[in-house]
Each structure stands twice: as structure tokens, then as C-alpha cells.
Amino acid sequence: MLIYGWRKSVQELATATYLCGNCQNPSAHALRRAVTKFTLFFIPLFPISSKYFTVCTFCGMTNKLTKDEARQVQAMQQQAPQAAFPQQHAPQYPQQQIQPPRQGF
């Protein structure tokens, strides 16, 4: 008796920030890959299909992508930290110390 089937697993590849087409908010989008693998006796052997999609973290909208579009999103994610945080130092403001209120009768 052979026991065969398939199993689907989802991997998160990257997170990129851009304008969502559904909610029109600039939010983070998780790039994910769903892989379906053939299993024999509950052991995954080889992939049958692979699909890429993004999920908006604000509204939950999903968009299917091709492999090339997924690579573009990964490249966008790698460029974003360098552009979003330049090497300039942020101005530092003096901190004010707040005295706790006196308790008295």
C-alpha cells in the first residue's frame, strides 16, 4: 500500500514598503512563496508548483506575482533600507528631567 499526496508550505522571503493598490496606504508588504511538494509516506520529495504573492500588512490584500516580479520586490527591499536611513545623524535635543510631584499634607 502506497501513501502519497502533496503538502503546501509558505515561506516569507522579504518585506518591502510601497503604496497598496487596495487601501492606498504606504504600508509594508510581505513577499511570500507557496511551494507544493509531492509526498510519499508523508515525506516531501520534490516540488510540484511554486507561487509568489504579496500580502499588505495594513488591509490584508494579496497580489499574485510572477517569479520576475518577486525578484523585483526583493531588490526593492534590499535598496529600501539604504535609501530610507541615510548616514546623516539625527539632531539630538536636550532631555528635560521631570521632578515627581511632592506629596504633602
Image (cartoon, rainbow, N blue to C red):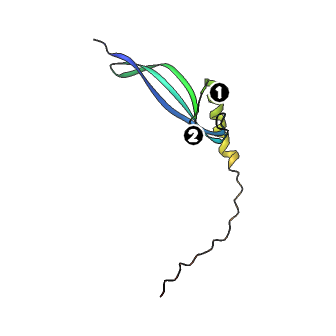
Question: Residue 12's x, y, as percent?
Answer: 52, 34
Q: Please state which of the two labelled residues, at mark 2 or mark 1, is closer to the viewer.
A: 2
Q: Residue at x 46, y 22 (%)?
A: 36
Query: What amino acid type should be assigned to the residue bearing mark 2?
Result: Thr
SS at badge 2: loop
SS at badge 1: helix
Q: Residue at x 32, y 15 (%)?
A: 3
Question: Residue 10's x, y, as percent?
Answer: 48, 30
Marked residue nearer the N-terminal end (2 or 1): 2
Q: Image quadrant for the N terminus?
A: top left
The answer to whether 22 is drawn above or below residue 99 in the figure is above
Question: Residue 102's x, y, as percent?
Answer: 51, 83
The answer to whether 100 is drawn above or below residue 12 in the figure is below
* Residue hosting label 1: 69
* Residue hosting label 2: 57
Left or right, 105 with respect to 88, comes to left
Query: What amino acid type should be assigned to the residue bearing mark 1?
Result: Glu
